Amino acid sequence: MDVPSKKLYEGGTDDIVDIIDLKVPSELVGSLRLKENIYPAYHMNKEHWITIKLDSDFPESELKALVDDSYKLTT
């Protein structure tokens, strides 16, 4: 999904960034949001969902694991 960066964080701009929203166990949300390029979920319940900026240096292996976990939580 493409959104302006100002929708993700204070100080963002109208520049468009590519993001993905993922469901994660609520007990992991806080620690994950401490990582760079992970934000409170855009348009989702922030207690169970996170947003990851895809055009970042976020580790691909970690992203794949989070996508797999999100799929399991939502099916």
Image (cartoon, grey):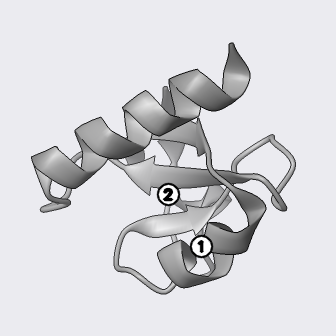
Please name the amino acid that badge 1 sits on.
Tyr
Residue at 70%, 47% in the rendered image: 42
Report the front residue among 9 and 57: 57
Residue at 50%, 73% in the rendered image: 32
Residue 4 percent across, percent down from the top left:
53, 47
Q: Quadrant of residue 67?
A: top left
Residue 36 percent across, percent down from the top left:
34, 78
Report the front residue among 10 and 45: 45
Residue at 70%, 22% in the rendered image: 74
The secondary structure type at the circle numbered 2 is: helix
- Residue with the mark numbered 2: 5
The vertical placement of 13 against 30, above or below, is above
Residue 46 percent across, percent down from the top left:
81, 59
Evaluate whether residue 19 shows in this view.
no
The numbered disc on residue 9 is 1
Please name the amino acid that badge 2 sits on.
Ser
